[in-house]
Amino acid sequence: MLAVRLLFSLVLMSVCVVMHAQISGVVFDMETRRQISGVRIYINPKGTAITDTHGRFVINQPCNGVTFSHVSYESRAYSRKELCDTIWLMPKLHRLDEVVVTAQGPKMCVSKEEVAKYASQFSGKPPSGFSFLDLFNFRGHKLEKRHKRIAKILKDY
């Protein structure tokens, strides 16, 4: 009976030590209150861990302290006693100097006279002919009627 009690206490103590060594939690952004994935956790004296897509982490080894580090956030260090299940990281502020953008205007390869000559070819009315699709172009019919009405008003004026 004594051996069973001794064996049971040893198993219970080993479970308590394992449970005591496991630390879990979630890392949040302090401004947006969202979980941060990919935060690297440096464990003192040795070891590392990374948060998953939901910002959760698990440390399965004894540690004296941890440091949370991410490219977009300020690093933060905790001792074993300070460590809790919710970690808040502050985003880094990236300040940029003033940026001035300058550019040159486009260079014309063709003279304005050539463009005017080419455009004069198309200044007349489009060739009149039957087109089946023009039957369904209600907007074009309205514009044509409007142009005729305006031309008549200008002619009578």
Image: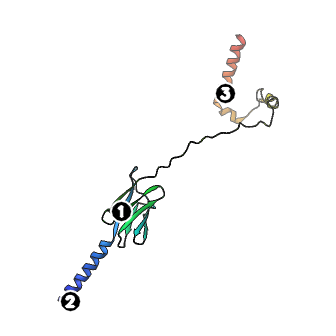
Mark 2 and mark 1 lie on one chain; the one further toward the N terminus is: 2
- Nearer the camera: disc 3 or disc 1: 1
- The circle on residue 141 is 3
Mark 3 and mark 1 lie on one chain; the one further toward the N terminus is: 1
**Residue 70 at x, y = what percent?**
46, 59
- The circle on residue 3 is 2
Mark 2, other Cα within 10 Å: few <14 / some 14–19 / many ≥20:
few
To which residue does mark 1 refer?
78
Q: Nearer the viewer, residue 87 or 152?
A: 87
Query: CB under 8 Å between callouts 2 and 1?
Result: no
Mark 2 secondary-structure assignment: helix
Residue located 66% across and 27% down the image? 141
Q: Nearer the viewer, residue 16 or 71?
A: 71
Quarter of the image for residue 146 reads top right
Q: Nearer the viewer, residue 44 or 152?
A: 44
Mark 2 and mark 3 lie on one chain; the one further toward the N terminus is: 2
**Residue 53 at x, y = what percent?**
44, 61
Quarter of the image for residue 11 reads bottom left
